[in-house]
Image: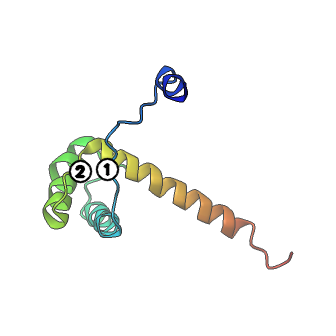
Amino acid sequence: MGDSQENIKGKSRDKNYVSWTMEETNELLHLLVDAINRGLCNTNGLLSKQNVERIILPRLNDKTKSLKNYSHYLSRMKWFKNQYNMTSTLMRHNSGFG
């Protein structure tokens, strides 16, 4: 009964999720900083999909011996954004009192 309800909602238990190791995450962060320092971002300060697929992901996959693609990259960027938001909220409400 639970499985049928999950399938109705669009979620399936047999999806293949790829987890990120700390090594992969750190390497991605280093590659992103390097790409931005080299001026590969557009006028909005964002990296284009072409630059990510052409430059960052091949280097990441070579160094970490993984098979990450653009959807994995987007997932990790969402995770980075969530971590940043949690940390900035914590620091914003950290007055030392309370």
> How far across and down, in percent of the image, does residue 59 sit?
16, 60
Residue reaching furthest bottom? 96
Front-most of residues 38 and 69 = 69
Question: In percent of the image, x 36 and y 49: which residue is there?
Answer: 46
Residue reaching furthest right? 98
* Amino acid type, label 2: Lys
What quarter of the picture does the N terminus occupy?
top right
Question: In percent of the image, x 15 and y 55: which residue is there?
Answer: 58
- CA distance for labels 1 and 2: 8 Å
Q: Is residue 80 left or right of residue 50?
A: right
Q: Is residue 73 left or right of residue 55?
A: right
Front-most of residues 16 and 95 = 16
Disc 2 marks which residue? 68
Question: In percent of the image, x 85 and y 77: which residue is there?
Answer: 97
Of callouts 1 and 2, the N-terminal one: 1
Question: In percent of the image, x 33 and y 69: which residue is there?
Answer: 26
Image height of 87 relative to 50, above or below: below
Disc 1 marks which residue? 18
> How far across and down, in percent of the image, does residue 85 sit?
59, 57
SS state under label 1: loop
Q: Is residue 42 left or right of residue 86?
A: left
Image height of 14 relative to 57, above or below: above
